[in-house]
Amino acid sequence: MQYHEVEFLGSAADRSQWPATDVPEILFCGRSNAGKSSLINALTNRKNAAWTGKTPGKTVLLNFFLIDQKVVYTDAPGYGYAKGGTKRAVDFGGLLEPYFQQREQLKALVLVLDIRRIPNDDDLTMIEAGKKAHLPVLAACTKADKVSKNEANNQLRRIAAETGIPISHLYPVSNTAKSGIEAFEKALLQAVTNKE
């Protein structure tokens, strides 16, 4: 697997802190325990490109990572973790809505889902936000090593039915086993360059 050059561009609580870039950006969203930061680490073949922890909900800002001087991965706060309460939900909306609406470099949305779970209302809301912003939505279905191939296929069909995301845009991956990572990385490149 290729070892990528990764530069942390900074964290942002509002538009004034967004980094000045001119390359495509891909936003990574998902539940706090879906493996979002671990996926970014797996995609970059780095152990600590994006911070991960045993306690869900550690990412509270937009974190920007420049990959090989070609694309930016934007790591959004995880959602659906109860500790934050209502105030955090308000902050989350205030953080992401301007980014969806005003960030011209934003070219794709990655929804990170635990393949063992059915998407919830927060996931569906995120998909709608991506569609409203006219972004291609791809789902990385993590923890694929925790289920059999047959069970994974069944879950992908359920997720596609629940979300409306075509099954061709659902990618079973394992951050620990590194399975499916290269195929998903290729799909991301196609999404931001419009190449098939």
Image (spheres, helix red, strand yellow):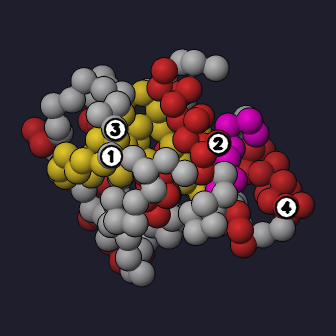
Task: Give the spatial CA distance, label 2 vs label 1.
Answer: 19 Å
**Boundaries of the magenta span:** 167-173
Task: Give the spatial CA distance, label 4 vs label 1.
Answer: 33 Å
Secondary structure at numbered mark 3: loop
Q: Are marks 2 and 1 in contact (CB under 8 Å)?
A: no
Q: Is residue 56 left or right of residue 15?
A: right
Name of the residue lying farthest toward the front: 2
Closer to the camera, 171 or 60?
171
Disc 4: CA contacts within 10 A as few (<14), some (14-19) or many (>=20): few
Q: Name the residue located 34 percent from the left edge and 38 percent from the top edge.
A: 68
Label 4, on which residue?
A: 149
Amino acid, disc 4: Lys
Residue 183's disc number:
2
Q: Position of residue 37 (x, y in %)?
A: 42, 61
Where does the C terminus fall, quadrant-wise? top right
Secondary structure at numbered mark 1: loop
Question: Is tag 2's residue or tag 1's residue first in the polypeptide sequence?
Answer: 1
Label 3, on which residue?
A: 68
Res. 189 in view: yes
Q: Are marks 1 and 3 in contact (CB under 8 Å)?
A: yes
Task: Give the spatial CA distance, label 4 vs label 3.
Answer: 33 Å
Disc 3: CA contacts within 10 A as few (<14), some (14-19) or many (>=20): few
Q: Nearer the viewer, mark 2 or mark 1?
A: 1
Q: Is residue 91 left or right of residue 17?
A: right
Task: Give the spatial CA distance, label 4 vs label 2.
Answer: 17 Å
Label 1, on which residue?
A: 5
Amino acid, disc 1: Glu
